Image: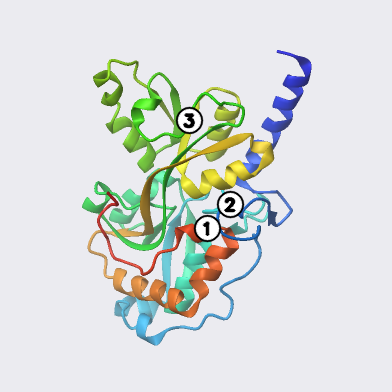
Amino acid sequence: MRTTTVRRLLAATALLPLLALAACGSDPKIAGAAATGGPAASATEDVVAGLARSEAAAALLPEEVRKAGALTFGSSFGAPPSAFYVDQVSKKPAGIDVDFTDAVAKVLGLTVNRQEAAFETILPALDSGKFDVGTGNFGVTTARLKTIDFVTYIDDGQGFAVKKDNTAIQPITDLVQLCGLTVGTGAGTTFETTLNSRKNVCTDAGKKPYEVRAFSESGALLTSLQQGRVDIEMSTINGLRHQAAQEASGTRFLGEFHRLDVGFAFKKGSKLTPAFQAAVNQLIKDGTYQRILRKWGVADSAIEESRISPPEHP
């Protein structure tokens, strides 16, 4: 490998954790957030300040929750624009999930007790009662609906990305295109489930199966893609668009594969869902919803109304 190439790779690699975990470090401006719908976002811009409690929505809460005045959220933090830390020193949270959590809490008159947790641990912890609500850009799938209830607030889904200089891999419309490749994705995600459940497409086509490598940290996944340890990354549409907009990431977004509703997650049968649905619909009605989407440049993820546990998108 030539010396100049090595230097470029090392320089890009050094920036990867910042891109994946803390946007631009101490700089609150997140470059390139305008992937589909607006100007670059400021991680510190408060678009939910001044929101008032909705008595109609709050009245839908269980009495014991209204009296307690707080709920515990199990929250996953990784890469922008979903949920991340502006910097690793202050641990100030930012992102779409954070803004919607704070906005819904204001509408319901609740205090947010936000506890960071690994993505793959949150849904099981809802059933045990450790958390009241889960956030982590959780997609609504048929499998998850068996044990989890959702209140939707955006539409995101599954997509793919490769290194920018990889022109051999074209937009993925069928998983058979992955045969013989190493695919990196997040542990415990819908992406991992989709990939593992459909490996047979390659053997059925008489081709070499693809290999799936799951990562618990988004920074490690991005580094593996950049360094060629995985050929292609499967992750969220919004996340991959944002990532590709960061020049130093050296990645190229291949396009959408499968859209999914995204929602707040609850234990099956939770009595919290009607109040959360009413709160999200109030945000849509008063314009706060659109301000949040514009802030993070994800206008394409808008929904017309919040729903409780809708079926998975076909």
The residues tagged by marks 3 and 2 sit, at their Cα atoms, a distance apart of 20 Å
- Amino acid identity at mark 1: Val
Task: Please say if the residues under marks 2 and 1 sit with CB atoms less than 8 Å apart.
Answer: yes
Position of 183 relative to 303 (above/below): above
Q: Give the camera-side residue of 186 and 76.
A: 186
1 or 3: tag closer to the N-terminus: 3
- Amino acid identity at mark 2: Ala
Q: Give the camera-side residue of 270 and 173.
A: 173
Please rate how many residues cluster around mark 2, counting C-alpha atoms within 10 Å: few if below 14, some from 14 to 19, many from 20: many
* Left or right: where 90 falls relative to 146: right
Please rate how many residues cluster around mark 3, counting C-alpha atoms within 10 Å: few if below 14, some from 14 to 19, many from 20: some
2 or 1: tag closer to the N-terminus: 2
Residue under numbered circle 1: 298
Residue under numbered circle 3: 170
The residues tagged by marks 2 and 1 sit, at their Cα atoms, a distance apart of 7 Å
Residue under numbered circle 2: 35
Mark identifier at residue 135: none
Position of 211 relative to 54 (above/below): above
3 or 2: tag closer to the N-terminus: 2
Asked whether residue 215 is in view, the answer is no
Residue placed furthest toward the top:
1
Which residue shows up at 39% across the image and 86% down it? 55
Q: Quadrant of the N terminus?
A: top right
Q: Give the camera-side residue of 305 and 62.
A: 305
Which residue shows up at 38% across the image and 68% down it? 304
Q: Position of residue 52 (x, y in %)?
A: 50, 83
